[in-house]
Image (cartoon, rainbow, N blue to C red):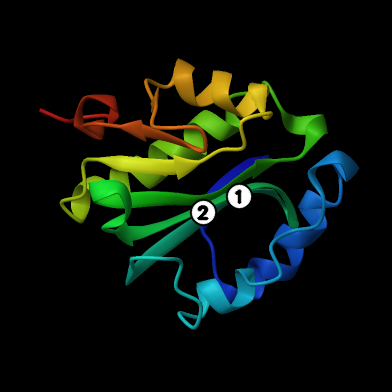
Amino acid sequence: MLDYRVAQTADVERMAQCRLADPAAGPADERMAAYFAGKHHPQQASAPRIGYVAAIGDLVVGYTAGHLTRRHQCDGELQYLFVSPAHRRLGIAGELVLRMFQWFVTQGAYKICVNVAPENEPARAFYGSMGATELGQYWSVWLDIRARVRGAA
């Protein structure tokens, strides 16, 4: 059974293993453990951050993380999002992003950005389907995520 929960520093190894399921994606960010431990701060990031994992038992099949920021005049940044190939197109990425959006809203962060490689058409299409618009060559942005969050007024 698929379970979503807040990611812990102890989950980083399982998150890295999850990413190995897609050789084209390359290895997980080597700074991920430091990010979750609050020792790595992306450009213009604030300390508040959170991550979520989608897991079947101890097997992580997807993960996300984000933090507050001032980058690109945004309030928050989606730092990581990955779902293993065998579990894609099942709504997992959308649920992970929704959980991030819910956290951002509790933090008063409504304008959210995400870095996405220009050649990563699947990611660009996914973010676009969730309402993001392009912000230059390497970034997409949601101007106000409140309408995308369940129960938002």
Q: Position of residue 83 (x, y in %)?
A: 69, 39
Asked if the residue under mark 1 is in contact with the one under mark 2, i.e. CB atoms within 8 Å, the reply is yes
Q: Earlier in the sequence, mark 2 or mark 1?
A: 2
Which element type, helix, strand or loop, lies under badge 2?
A: strand
Q: Position of residue 115 (x, y in %)?
A: 50, 43
Q: Which residue is mark 1?
A: 63
Task: Give the amino acid type for the residue marked by disc 1 in the picture.
Answer: Tyr
Between residues 145 and 123, which one lies in front from this camera angle?
A: 123
State the residue in front, 118 or 9.
118
> Left or right: 109 with respect to 93?
left
Q: Which residue is mark 2?
A: 52
* Element type where label 1 sits in the image: strand
Residue 135 appears in which quarter of the rendering?
Answer: top left
**Quadrant holding the N terminus:** top right
Q: Amino acid at mark 2?
A: Tyr
Q: How many marks?
A: 2
